[in-house]
Amino acid sequence: MEKDLLSEVIEVEKELQKNLDLEKDKSREWLEQIRKEFEEGFTHEETSLAESLRRSLEVAKQDAEAKASDIANQSVQKILLITKINNEGLSKIIGRHLSRILPV
């Protein structure tokens, strides 16, 4: 009888160990699946952020180029205006300003 009881206990322990091993395997598989899902999500998010950064940089570059072009055009216009003033006109302007500063 003791032998039967001991055999039964051993069988139950083996069954428990088998069930425990199965649960461990299921847990490992579940964790692996979750890891893959997070990895895929992370990769997708990383790609999305990289694309967003690329678009933002492109917009910033275009804005900077437009502003630089505007500044260059304004500078050219001012240079053209200055070159149109001949020496006589320039002398009059300078004389007017100097007469305010220096006593005659």
Image: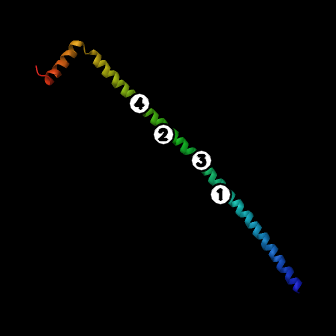
Where is mark 3, residue-wise?
44
Q: Reading the chain from its start, which is encountered first: label 2 or label 3?
A: 3
Secondary structure of residue under mark 2: helix
Q: At which x and y percent is residue 69? A: 40, 27
Q: Reading the chain from its start, which is encountered first: label 2 or label 1?
A: 1
Foreground label between 4 and 3:
4
Image side of residue 81 versus residue 8, left or right:
left
Tell me what residue is drawn at x 30 percent, y 22 percent: 78
> How many numbered tags mark residues here?
4
Q: At which x and y percent is residue 47? A: 58, 44
Real-space CA distance between mark 4 and mark 2, rounded to the nearest whole angstrom: 15 Å
Residue type at mark 4: give it: Ala
Image side of residue 75 versus residue 15, left or right:
left
Q: Reading the chain from its start, which is encountered first: label 4 or label 2?
A: 2
Q: Which of the two residues, 40 or 10, is positioned nearer the viewer here? A: 10
Q: Are marks 2 and 3 in contact (CB under 8 Å)?
A: no
Where is mark 1, residue-wise?
34
Real-space CA distance between mark 3 and mark 1, rounded to the nearest whole angstrom: 15 Å
Q: Are marks 3 and 1 in contact (CB under 8 Å)?
A: no
Is 56 rendered above or below residue 32?
above
Q: At which x and y percent is residue 52? A: 51, 42
Real-space CA distance between mark 2 and mark 1, rounded to the nearest whole angstrom: 32 Å
Which mark identifies residue 56?
Answer: 2
Label 4 packing within 10 angstroms: few (<14), some (14-19), many (20+) = few
Is 103 rendered above or below residue 54?
above
Label 3 packing within 10 angstroms: few (<14), some (14-19), many (20+) = few
Secondary structure of residue under mark 3: helix
Q: Are marks 4 and 2 in contact (CB under 8 Å)?
A: no
Real-space CA distance between mark 2 and mark 3, rounded to the nearest whole angstrom: 18 Å
